[in-house]
Image: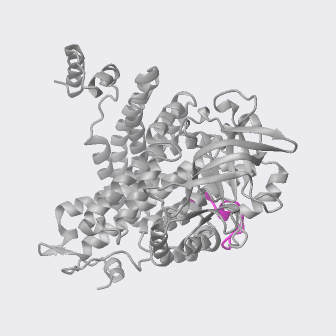
């Protein structure tokens, strides 16, 4: 039986010695949950107009795109510093498979252009919900190229918002082009050796020369280093220290006369994942650049794209979670062990269910956040405030969870999953970067706390959740809503307690709080979707998923006080790490807190 027939018939037939994978499946047609979500958030007209394109991308994702992605992963980019005549060219050569993927991403499916202008037969630019539906399908097969796609999209958005008319006229049309012969890709060069996430420590400088600026210094990590246009953070001469002294500059790869701009690509990074996309180290030797927006607000302007970049990261990680589940399901249903299909084994059912639960939950909150993003773009102030806290929540939890999902998917396939001939190892490698770029998990967890304390985003967050629960009318979902409301009220109380702490004691529980806030919000969305499904179809599937989610992620792990051990850890950390002496009093204090937590 073919894999396609196996999936579409929901058959439990399996064969001894079979090694099935997802090749040939249409990733859109296999994903009924994606269809459910898109139909819910989109108008009927937009959904019907998008449907043939979604089906086509789903087909290509399960066939040609997947083949190209694996080829490009094995044939990594090569940096050519000099040509045959000894002239410096700093050219990055890509395998033909990567160039073909560019034609699909930038061209055929207009994944960048769709955010900025009408494409694919639409009369206007596409809403974020639909945009990320396309990205969700594309990334299930190709993650690496999604980084340049996202950076080009973000750079165009920033330029459109802050750039002067001259810059827009010169660069925007090329950055949003769907013509493979004329499109330009974008990047953001921010990271320096001494900076990392501490961007305020950056030392790259900008000097004013006539009608432009010159950039001097080194950037340590530049993804899509071959970009035609890069947004660069640099400190103008005489500007203050910290992020307040950083300006944003647009730096073209080539000058108007066709010569290379004055910067060198020193080498490409040998990365664990996203190997088909070139990241490199750059030295600026007076590179020509132009100010974007207010030179005193460069960092703030760059951070204005953080919502789109973090949401994009979450969508991409969610896509890899979905692909890992699909691979594990196909493999388990089609393979025999100990006399029956692997998918009939109780522990394999548990593994597959948790993979499915995680990816559906991630899809629920990412696409809801995309709908909030649409409202924010339309000038809704409350949506903008809600977006401020949702995007770090998504980035922090989903990108980390994708590492677990891809690893579990690999293990579900067994020994083959560990072999590079199969997709699982690539998914594992690519999944790890989501928790690193655009802010590590620690950074975004602290940003969640910052959003609560500085931006007072907690009120809009919990009100949105409570209003959704209050709107539930169906009997069974309403009973579950009452349980979730109690849990959410406790998490709200814990958030207030953490906000009242000072300094290090506030930071220690930040990740735990971020995770719990993610779970209660996601559970409320699953419950809302369940009521929609019950009303429309008399189907209780999503309600079952909701209950499982609440039990697994909110009840079975406990809802103890997030801060009961923190102060002792702050005091004892060095002694513990250095294998030094820890006092009896430290243990007695910790024991007392533990006993109170378990009511002994």
| In the image, farthest residue toward the front | 85
Residue 243 coordinates in the image, percent (x, y): 64, 32
Residue 60 coordinates in the image, percent (x, y): 50, 77
Q: Nearer the viewer, residue 585 or 388?
A: 585
Magenta-drawn stretch contains 127: yes
Q: Nearer the viewer, residue 478 or 512?
A: 512
- Residue at x-position 69% and y-position 35%: 246
Q: Is residue 420 above or below residue 385?
A: below
| In the image, farthest residue toward the bottom | 1
Task: Classify the position of the N terminus by image quarter.
Answer: bottom left
Q: Main secondary structure of the magenta part?
A: loop
Task: Classify the position of the C terminus by image quarter.
Answer: top left
Indicate left or right for 348 with 145 as reference: left
Q: Is residue 429 above or below residue 202?
A: below
Q: Nearer the viewer, residue 254 or 101?
A: 254
Indicate left or right for 192 with 72 as reference: right
Residue 292 seen from this side:
yes
Coloration mode: one colour
Determine the image quadrant of residue 99: bottom right
Residue 166 coordinates in the image, percent (x, y): 85, 53
Q: Nearer the viewer, residue 473 or 377?
A: 377
Residue 59 coordinates in the image, percent (x, y): 48, 78
Q: Which residues are magenta?
A: 112-129
Determine the image quadrant of residue 441: top left
| In the image, farthest residue toward the top | 585
Magenta-drawn stretch contains 42: no
Indicate left or right for 210 with 446 as reference: right
Residue 543 seen from this side:
no
């Amino acid at each position: 039986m073919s894999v396609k027939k196996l999936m579409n018939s929901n058959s439990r037939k399996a064969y001894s010695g079979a090694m099935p994978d997802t090749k040939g499946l249409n990733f859109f047609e296999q994903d009924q949950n994606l269809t459910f979500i898109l139909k819910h958030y989109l108008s009927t007209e937009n959904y019907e107009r998008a449907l043939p394109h979604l089906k086509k991308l789903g087909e290509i994702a399960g066939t040609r795109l997947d083949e190209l992605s694996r080829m490009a992963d094995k044939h990594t980019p090569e940096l050519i510093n000099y040509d045959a005549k000894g002239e410096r060219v700093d050219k990055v050569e890509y395998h033909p498979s990567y160039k073909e993927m560019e034609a699909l991403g930038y061209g055929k499916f207009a994944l960048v252009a769709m955010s900025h202008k009408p494409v694919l037969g639409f009369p206007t630019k596409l809403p974020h919900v639909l945009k990320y539906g396309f990205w969700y399908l594309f990334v299930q097969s190709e993650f690496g190229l999604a980084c340049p796609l996202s950076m080009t999209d973000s750079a165009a958005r920033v330029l459109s918002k802050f750039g002067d008319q001259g810059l827009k006229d010169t660069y925007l049309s090329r950055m949003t082009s769907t013509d493979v012969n004329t499109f330009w890709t974008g990047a953001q060069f921010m990271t320096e050796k001494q900076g990392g996430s501490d961007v305020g420590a950056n030392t790259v400088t900008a000097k004013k020369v006539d009608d432009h600026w010159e950039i001097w210094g080194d950037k340590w990590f530049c993804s899509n280093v071959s970009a035609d246009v890069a947004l660069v953070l640099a400190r103008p001469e005489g500007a203050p220290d910290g992020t307040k002294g950083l300006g944003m500059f647009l730096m073209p790869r080539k000058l108007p006369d066709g010569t290379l701009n004055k910067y060198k690509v020193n080498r490409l990074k040998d990365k664990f994942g996203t190997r088909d996309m070139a990241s490199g180290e750059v030295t600026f030797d007076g590179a020509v650049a132009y100010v974007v927006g207010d030179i005193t607000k460069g960092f703030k302007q760059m951070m204005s794209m953080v919502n789109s970049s973090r949401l994009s990261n979450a969508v991409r990680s969610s896509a890899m979670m979905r692909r890992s589940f699909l691979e594990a399901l196909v493999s388990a249903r089609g393979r025999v062990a100990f006399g029956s299909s692997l998918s009939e084994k109780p522990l394999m059912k548990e593994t597959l269910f948790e993979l499915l639960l995680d990816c559906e939950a991630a899809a629920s909150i990412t696409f809801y956040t995309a709908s909030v993003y649409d409202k924010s773009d339309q000038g809704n102030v409350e949506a903008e405030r809600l977006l401020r806290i949702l995007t770090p929540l998504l980035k922090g939890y989903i990108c980390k969870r994708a590492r677990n999902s891809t690893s579990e998917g690999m293990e579900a396939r067994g020994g083959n999953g560990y072999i590079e001939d199969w997709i699982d190892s690539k998914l594992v490698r690519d999944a790890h970067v989501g928790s690193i770029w655009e802010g590590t998990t620690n950074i975004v967890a602290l940003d969640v706390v910052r959003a609560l304390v500085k931006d007072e985003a907690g009120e809009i967050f919990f009100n949105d959740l409570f209003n959704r629960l209050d709107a539930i009318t169906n009997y069974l979902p309403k009973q579950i809503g009452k349980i979730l409301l109690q849990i959410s009220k406790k998490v709200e109380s814990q958030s207030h307690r953490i906000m009242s702490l000072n300094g290090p004691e506030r930071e220690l529980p930040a990740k735990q709080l971020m995770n719990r806030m993610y779970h209660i919000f996601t559970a409320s969305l699953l419950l809302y979707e369940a009521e929609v499904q019950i009303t429309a179809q008399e189907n209780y599937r999503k309600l079952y998923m909701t209950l499982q989610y609440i039990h697994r992620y909110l009840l079975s792990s406990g809802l103890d006080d997030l801060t009961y051990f923190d102060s002792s850890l702050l005091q004892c950390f060095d002694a513990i790490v250095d294998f030094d002496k820890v006092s009896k009093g430290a243990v007695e204090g910790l024991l007392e807190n533990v006993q109170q937590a378990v009511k002994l």
